[in-house]
Image (cartoon, rainbow, N blue to C red):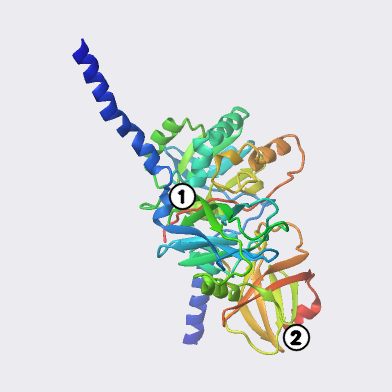
Amino acid sequence: MLDRSVIRLVWFFSVGPVWLAPATLTSAQSPADQHVKVELISEQDAIVPHSKIWVGIRFDLQDEWHTYWVNPGDSGEPPRIEWELPLGFQAGAIQWPYPVRLSTPPFVDFGYEHQVLLIAAVQPSQALREGVSQRIEARVHYLVCRDVCIPGQKQLELTLPVKSRAVAGSDVQLFEATRRRLPQPAPESWKISAASLGDDFVLNLIIGGSAGAPQFFPSEEEQIENAAPQTATTIPGGFRLHLKKSKHLLKPLSRLRGVLVVGSGKAYRVDVPVLPSSRNVHAQS
Amino acid sequence: MKQNLWWGLLVALLLTCSISAFAQQKVGDQAPEFQATDSNGQTHKLSEYRGKFVVLEWHNNGCPYTRKHYESGNMQRLQKEWTARGVIWFTVISSAPGQQGFVTAQQENDYLKQMNGAPTAALLDPQGDVGRLYSAKTTPHMFVINPTGVLIYDGAIDSKATTDQADIATATNYVSQALEEAMAGKPVTTPTSRPYGCSVKYAH
């Protein structure tokens, strides 16, 4: 009798833990991890009281995999970030670098390949004093796709000391490069207007010259046919982009908002009223 | 003269290409007539169902957005509820052979049994003909056609474009909304929305 009990006990302690182990091993991993690495990074090495600090979510994607812009286009989903900050801290809006067109005919999505950093400014609490380190957390939901799509979720954290002075961190150049890819207000000298013209919207850009291979990325879904080619025609002082209307657009559009990217890799914010068709517009085409 | 002939042929070719490309029917237009074979070998034509509401549900069983609605039981609930109320519900699979979501008739029947799916039928569209006819972009992408053959809804299944099952309960289901409103003789509040999901895996 004693022998059997001992045998059972020994069996339980040797086999039991093996059942438990696999669950804890896989809890931190997800299928998306094979194709993207997601990290929370900061521009500088410390938080300085009363100064904002730029942080970012960095996505490093395997070749051929991509993730999405704020307007993902025909399919896909943009990353969502939920900040968990110390008391009194506030995070600003995510700044989206301009995307690229991701074409899987007959569709076009808008997003990022290889690497993207989504940055936000964090304003520390007014009461913050030097001394106690602060932890910034972010829960990130994202979708990475190639020919198939894999959703992922990560809980990220970053602990930073609080000091009277901070120095640039090791990722500062990535932050600077990212800022160069953020859409800027259009130059004062530019005249931008939009009009409805049959099945298209036309975006007129009087910029005092030409712009190599302009591309327009709409901020909002269901306004433009994402996959339609955007033909550019020359007009006095600039060019006109023809943007095919989405067949999901059932009412006239009052404003056209988006990002214009010109050949040199500069991006500009566009936010203009859409004028109804007029004879002037027809005469020019 | 010969040059004109070549130009003529080129224009004709371009026209043909654009016609066989994605259709541009809008909500409010007659829904395009289609013919397709289901997973039991039966053929169906849209016109056979004149006099009934018809729902088209684009499907890919590997896509995380489709899985959201199937693993939660949401899609099956909708299929049961609406077919019980006389709606014809077609699941449509336009994935090309070798692409995610492609299924043989047997595989689709096994899947429906396993998932307790309750569509009227599962239409197998590996050539993508029905998909292209409707410009189906994502899985899921939902269309609702009224008894006179008019397209009354084209878009997402609901208002929360995520892969998270927890979002289903608090989302507005646009398909149910369109069917309820149309059945009550009311205008459809949300006739279009951006369909969300994975791209339909047409042949390249």
Judge whether residue A225 can be spotted in this image: no
Q: Which residue is identified by label 2? A: A189
Quadrant housing residue B42 = top left
Judge whether residue A85 can be spotted in this image: yes
Nearer mark to the viewer, of 2 and 1? 2
Residue B3 position (above or below residue B173): below
Element carrying mark 1: loop
- Tell which residue pokes out farthest to the left in this image: A3
Quadrant housing residue A177 = bottom right
Placement of the N terminus of chain A among the 4 image quadrants = top left
Residue A255 image point, x, y percent: 76, 66
Residue A130 image point, x, y percent: 64, 61
Residue B197 image point, x, y percent: 54, 50
- The answer for how far apart the CA atoms under marks 2 and 1 are is 50 Å
- Tell which residue pokes out farthest to the top in this image: A1
Q: Which residue is identified by label 1? A: B94
Mark 1: few/some/many CA within 10 Å (<14, 14-19, 20+): many
The foreground one among A209 and B134 is: A209
Residue B7 position (above or below residue B157): below
Q: Name the amino acid type tagged 1.
A: Ser
